[in-house]
Image (tube, rainbow, N blue to C red):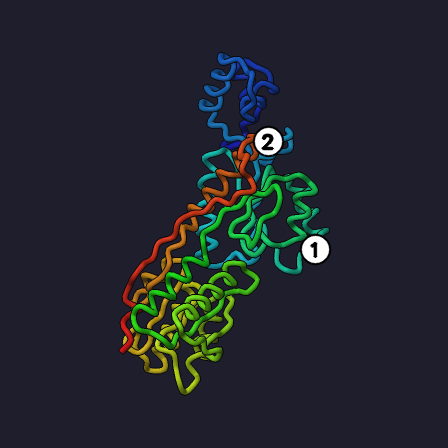
Amino acid sequence: MAEGRNPKTTIADVARVAGVSVTTVSRVLNGEKYVREDKKKAVERAVAKLDYQPNLYARSLAGDKSYLIGLLFDDPRGDYLSGMQRGAMQKCREEGYHVVVELFDRSTTLDQIDQFLSKLRPSGVLLTPPVCDNKIILAALARKGIPAVRISPSEGFPGMASVKIDDYHAARQMTEHLISLGHKDIGFIIGDIEHADARARLRAFRDAMRDAGLRVVEDWIAQGTYQFSSGLDAAAQILSHEKKPSAIFASNDDMAAATIVVADGMGLHVPEDLSVAGFDDIPLASAVSPALTTIRQPVEDMAVTAVGRLMDMLRGGDSDVNEPAFLDVEFIKRASTGPKN
């Protein structure tokens, strides 16, 4: 079957121009060792001359190595997941691998997972939250011996590497920032509770309030899903009470931006009447008015690091596979938070 940029160019054409066998061309393209240097150079020259680009799917069918990395999502929407895709694709491209994005929601069955793994035969898998905590998927990967790296999991899983930030410390830092501005009445919008990071951020908020001797008003705690629309509902719920908080900390920037919209609709000025803080530092955070005080999460770097760990595992390295790789966050102060009036 024809492959590459030129649909008429085949691996047999490369072999003919290079003066070697098709098997040798395949070995060179697959990066196998013990190919004579002169033959390797001849194949590389022929590939360049013919503008031949090997098809990763065809390579996966021809050998034991698939060159395919599965990137598993629960809901592939929003800037967080877009950043994750960009980082994974960038690093995989450098490594000569192709990313295949697959959606696995909470209704996914074991049969569906097995079919996906059997059909794709991925070299490895990246698991984003909350898929990274899906016991059915983890068990299927472990049973098939497929290397995997989990991004922001709630706990460890034997034999699987992970990459994360310290969500608890970051959310506590943001809460303490609001307290330092004189805010005592602070509301909180929870992220998707299926995500470990949402639970960690809520716990940090409660602990920081308690340690400062401040009371958490349960009427000012509302459940969101990390989506902008859920932030609208949550903010409206919190601000519907006669006594309102002077600040709201939303678990991500989408919901924080929604809080500003709701506040504006109620005639409240941010930050004079209501300080609003977010988390992630997505592009929306600096585009909304006023710009959001937030925690910058290195989403693309997390994906790059995850692919790097996966490559180490595929090469037989990463002896500390059970130790998470932690990336630093950055506190970003902008105009959406100010002193309590």
Judge from the rendering whether residue 232 lies leftward or rightward of residue 322; answer left or right: left
Q: Where the C terminus falls, by quadrant?
A: bottom left
Badge 2 element: helix
Q: Earlier in the sequence, mark 2 or mark 1?
A: 2
Badge 1 element: loop
Tell me how far mark 2 sits from mark 1, CA to CA.
29 Å
As drawn, the label of residue 59 is: 2
Q: Is residue 250 above or below residue 74?
A: below
Find disc 1 in the rendering and name its residue.
109
Q: Residue at x 48, y 80 (%)?
A: 219
Q: Where the N terminus falls, by quadrant?
A: top right
Front residue (pair 88, 151):
151
Q: Amino acid at mark 1?
A: Thr
Front residue (pair 232, 115):
232
Q: Amino acid at mark 2?
A: Arg
Q: Is residue 59 above or below residue 242?
A: above
Q: Residue at x 43, y 85 (%)?
A: 241
Q: Position of residue 77 (x, y in %)?
A: 50, 58
> Residue 256: which quarter of the image?
bottom left
For the image, the number of numbered tags is 2
The reply to whether residue 100 is visible in this rendering is no
> Residue 104: which quarter of the image?
bottom right
Q: Position of residue 47 (x, y in %)?
A: 48, 23
User: Local crowd at mark 1 within 10 Å, few (<14), some, or many (≥20)?
Assistant: few
Mark 2 vs mark 1, foreground winner is 1
